[in-house]
Amino acid sequence: MSIPAFSRAQAISAVYDQSGNTNAVYYVNASGHIQQLYMDTSWHVGWDFTSGLGAPTPAPHSSIAAVYDPIGNTNDLYYVNSSGHIQQLWMYTGWTVGWDATNNLGYMKHGDIFCCDELRRAVSDEDTPLLFVPKFREFGIRILDGGSSYLRLQFCPWSGAKLPESLRDQWFDTIETLGLDPSSDKVPPEFSDERWYTKRPT
Ligand SMILES: [Zn+2]
């Protein structure tokens, strides 16, 4: 096989994938894209993630980290994208462009966490039983019994994108570290929405 030329030899990562019983290596190719090689019984040229998947290009100084996640049975790839944000790509049955971690975890309003317009529209439509709970950063399907409970969604029903991790446990932990009991005490107003986790570090 003809191996795409290396661009930055320092940006390289390798991982064993237990689910597929394969080894993979990732590096930046001469086009400045993240390139995959993988081995089952022999080595193959795999993805060019920018040409093949539309993944954001890595920043010139980016390194690459690859990991197999045995809990979710996914392969995850992380690098710094050309916006200077940590970018995730992940693979369950096929590769998906995941979250831009800076947008996802931090410094923007929750309007930017929607993976597609369909999800954004469904959540903002009162007549559709889909909701976004900013304070826990959770998406869910309403249970139509007149109460406020919902079934949490892990993946977008339209695009299949992995939705952001819930911050429910961190919400309770953070309030407890303030010496407050969330079930009886009044909590500061920034804990009623996304403000408590979207504040920029000062
Ligand atoms: Zn979506």
Image (tube, helix red, strand yellow):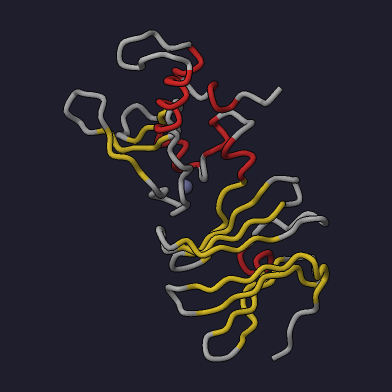
Among all residues in the image, which is located at the extreme left?
Answer: 145
Left or right for 155, reference 91? left
Left or right for 157, reference 84? left
Q: Give percent across and percent down for residue 128.
A: 32, 34
Displayed quadrant of residue 48 = bottom right
Identity of the residue drawn at 43% across and 27% down: 173
Image quadrant holding the C terminus, namely top right
Identity of the residue drawn at 38% across and 49% down: 157
Identity of the residue drawn at 54% across and 38% down: 113
Rendered view: 76 above or below 162: below
Identity of the residue drawn at 69% across and 71% down: 35
Q: Give percent across and percent down for residue 5.
A: 80, 78
Left or right for 143, reference 21? left
Q: Which residue is nearer to you in this view: 104 or 202? A: 202
Q: Which residue is nearer to you in this view: 131 or 63? A: 63
Q: What is the tally of numbered marks visible in this picture?
A: 0
Among all residues in the image, which is located at the extreme top?
Answer: 186
Image quadrant holding the N terminus, namely bottom right
Rendered view: 11 above or below 129: below
Q: Give percent across and percent down for residue 58.
A: 74, 57
Rendered view: 92 above or below 2: above
Left or right for 60, reference 189? right
Q: Which residue is nearer to you in this view: 12 or 156? A: 12
